[in-house]
Image (cartoon, helix red, strand yellow):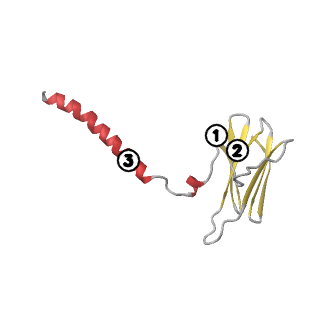
Amino acid sequence: MGRGARGAIRRPMALALAVLTAAGLLTLAGPTGSAEAVTPSCTGRKVRTLTFDAGTVRVYRKGTRYVCAVLVPKKRAGKKPSKAVLRIRPWRGEWVRNAKHLAGPVTVHAGRRCVWIHARVGTKNYDSGWILR
């Protein structure tokens, strides 16, 4: 076995070892524990961010037919989290909310219709008005 053959074997092994080491380090690092990682999220593309005193509502569009929203309440230092409720209503439709997770995500079939989003955190209310897609 010549010198060139050993180099040809060592390079792929070194590359594989580097990839495995990086994967192991990323696994050990895990999630960062930020609010973003814990908050349930919607799939699709984000089309709006609605901000009010007590939090933020992120609105997503799934394809051309579905609208999804999630409510992220603001953190209050040293205080108990307030109850957060999110509802969506398509034009000429019924109010929809997530029964398990009151802050969302909430998905509604809107098609090409407008939607109205209502959010409540504690005693603070927010109404978006009609939002077109």
Separation of residues labelled 2 and 3 (CA atoms): 35 Å
In the picture, which quadrant includes the N terminus? top left
Residue 25 lies left or right of residue 37; in this view the side is: left
Q: Looking at the rendering, which quadrant does residue 111 occupy? A: top right
First reached walking from the N terminus: tag 2 or tag 1: 1
Q: Provide the secondary structure element on which disc 2 rests.
A: strand
Say which residue label 2 marks.
68
Q: Provide the secondary structure element on which disc 1 rests.
A: loop
Question: Pointers 2 and 1 in contact (CB under 8 A)?
Answer: yes
Q: Which residue shows up at 78% across the image and 60% down it?
A: 125
Q: Which residue shows up at 27% across the image and 36% down it?
A: 13
Question: Height in image: 70 above or below 121?
Answer: above
Q: Position of residue 17 (x, y in %)?
A: 30, 41
Separation of residues labelled 3 and 1 (CA atoms): 30 Å
Question: Height in image: 21 above or below 7?
Answer: below
Q: Position of residue 86 (x, y in %)?
A: 74, 53
First reached walking from the N terminus: tag 3 or tag 1: 3
Say which residue label 1 marks.
44
Q: Provide the secondary structure element on which disc 3 rests.
A: helix
Separation of residues labelled 2 and 1 (CA atoms): 8 Å
Q: Which residue shows up at 22% across the image and 31% down it?
A: 9
Residue placed furthest toward the bottom: 78
Other residues around mark 1 within 10 Å, as few (<14) / some (14–19) / many (≥20): some
Residue placed furthest toward the right: 92
Q: Label for residue 24? A: 3
Residue type at numbered disc 2: Cys
The number of callouts visible is 3
Residue type at numbered disc 3: Gly
Residue type at numbered disc 1: Gly
